[in-house]
Image (spheres, rainbow, N blue to C red):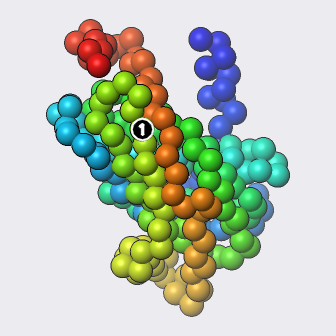
Amino acid sequence: MFLLVSMQGCVTEATSLRSPQDDGPKVLLVGKVVTLLTGERGRKFAPAVTEIELAEQDAGTRYRIPVDGAHEQFAVFLPPGRYEIIRVKIHEGPFLSMAVLDSSFVVEDVPIMFVGTWRFGVESPKYGRMLFVSMTLDDKGRQQVETDIRETYPGLLSTSMVTAIPVPAELQSRLYEVAPYPRISRYFRRHYW
C-alpha cells in the first residue's frame, strides 16, 4: 500500500492548455486518442482511455496526460526532449485496467507538435486480456486538431505544426485489471472471468 502511494507522488501532471507554466521552453503536444473494443461486449460499459503516462528519458521525469474519453483530442505543454510512452489507464465504467507500453518519440523545440492518432483496441473481458495499440498519421485527424488549436489560440496561426509518430507505431501489451477502490459497490468487486 505504501509503495503505491509513494509511486503516485513521482508523476508530474502535464501542463494543460489552460495553465502553461513558464519555467522553460514548452512545446504544445497535440494528438488524438481512439478507444474501441475488439470483440464481444462482456460489460455494458464501453472502454475509454483516461490517462497516458510518459517518461522523459534524459531527466527521468514522468508526465501524466489526461484524456477525457474514448474518441478525444489531447493537448498539453511539455519541455523538449526524448519521451517514452510507459503506461495507459483504461476505464470501463467502475472497472480500471492498466497496460505497460514501450514506444518512444522526440519532442523537438518547435511551437506545436502533432503525434498522430493513437488507436487503442481493447479485447473483451477475459483472462489474459490484451491491448493493441496503433499510432498512425491521419490527415483528417491532423486537420481537425490543427483547426481546433488555431481557433483556441489565434497567436499560433502563423506557426507550422511538426509531425512525429512514436516508434514502434504498432504494439500489443497485456492489460491488467486494477482492483477497485473500497468505496465501489461489492457487486463490481466480483470477477467471474
Residue in the picture at 52% in, 87% down: 157
Residue in the picture at 17% in, 34% down: 44
- In the drawing, does residue 45 fall left or right of residue 89? left
Compared with 71, 52 (above or below) is: above
Task: Tell which of 9 and 42 is nearer to you.
Answer: 42
Q: Quadrant of the C terminus?
A: top left
What is the three-letter code of the residue carrying label 1? Met
Q: Residues within 10 Å of mark 1 (few under 14, many from 20)?
A: some
Q: Pinpoint residue 51: horizontal percent, then vertical percent.
A: 48, 43
Task: Tell which of 20 and 167 is nearer to you.
Answer: 167
Task: Tell which of 42 and 8 is nearer to you.
Answer: 42
Q: Which residue sits furthest bottom?
A: 158
Q: Which residue sits furthest right?
A: 58
Compared with 125, 64 (above or below) is: below
The residue at which mark 1 appears reads as 130
Residue in the picture at 36% in, 49% down: 121
